[in-house]
Amino acid sequence: MSPRTVNAAVVIVAAGNSTRMGAASGARKPLLEIGERTLLEHSCAAFAELDAVSALVIVAHVDDIERIRALAKRTRALAKVVAVVPGGAQRTDSVRLGVAALPRDIEVVLVHDAARPLIRSHVIASAIEVAARDGAALVAVPVRDTLKSAPDGLRASATIEREHLWAAQTPQAFRASVLRDLLARAASDGVSATDDAALHERYLGPVTLVRGDESNLKITTPEDLALAQALFALRAKDDCS
């Protein structure tokens, strides 16, 4: 099943408090701007370009809901938004609320962080294809740094072999029926996870990897935002050359 024949939808997670961005930012991360577009718009744009993606649901901080709904009415990148819903207590709760707001005929669901505005359409298409085939897909990149273990937070006591380590990114994609079942089982067991692939690993086993892009960084700090601005400028220069 190719991405062109799959009916896919996206849950954009944008409900965090953005505490590590600092009070000076003046807004939560999804509504910060790069080049006169919010991070949320940038994060949705690559999905909006794909015919396979028919719907987006944004899970937002309760204080941002009305602004995001207004943005969706006038912004091309958010034209496929079918609902803006408030987030839950934990990330897994937010994803559950987002999935519940999707149309029932969706075959593949992608979950993406609004704080990753540099995602590319070809990576999304690969994730959709793999999830449709294997049930789930995890976008990730190989770890390049040398990793150290420091149990006391002061001294490195061991070097961790990086040969088999991958850094998880988003989107993470699932057959809709698989994700709904995973979220229901997690709710029943009182389980919350830092990403959705962890639920698949817990209940169903390994997740197929999709090679991501090093530029698909997650914006957490003001330094990350500055780096993202530079990467967007570089992309714009490449597009014009």
Image (cartoon, grey):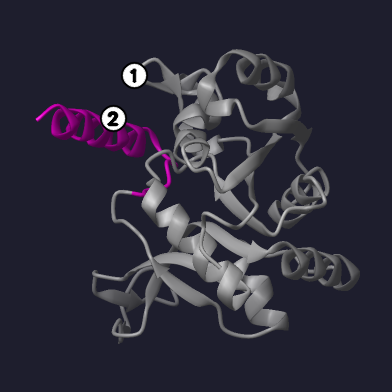
Looking at numbered disc 1 in the image, what kind of residue is underneath it? Answer: Gly
Is 190 positioned to the left or the right of 148 in the image? right
Residue appearing at x 43%, y 20% in the figure:
37
Residue appearing at x 55%, y 18% in the figure:
75
109 versus 222 height, above or below:
below
Q: Which residues are magenta?
A: 216-241
Q: Residues within 10 Å of mark 2 (few under 14, many from 20)?
A: some
**Tally of marks:** 2
Residue appearing at x 49%, y 40% in the figure:
115
Question: Between 45 and 50, which is closer to the camera in this rendering?
Answer: 50
Residue holding disc 1: 35
Residue 12 in picture, x, y percent from top left: 61, 42
Residue at the extreme front:
5
Residue at the extreme left:
241
The answer to the question of whether label 2 and label 1 lie on touching residues, with beta carbons closer than 8 A, is yes
* Local SS, label 2: helix
Residue holding disc 2: 229
Residue appearing at x 61%, y 53% in the figure:
111
Is 213 positioned to the left or the right of 2 in the image? left
149 versus 15 height, above or below:
below
Magenta region includes residue 24: no
Is 129 positioned to the left or the right of 216 in the image? right
21 versus 146 height, above or below:
above
Separation of disc 2 and disc 1 at Cα? 8 Å
Q: Residues within 10 Å of mark 1 (few under 14, many from 20)?
A: few
Residue 90 in picture, x, y percent from top left: 74, 52
Q: Is residue 195 visible?
A: no
240 versus 98 height, above or below:
above
Answer with the quarter of the image where residue 92 lies.
Answer: bottom right
Please report whichever mark, 2 or 1, sits nearer to the chain's N-terminal start: 1
Q: Quadrant of the N terminus?
A: bottom right
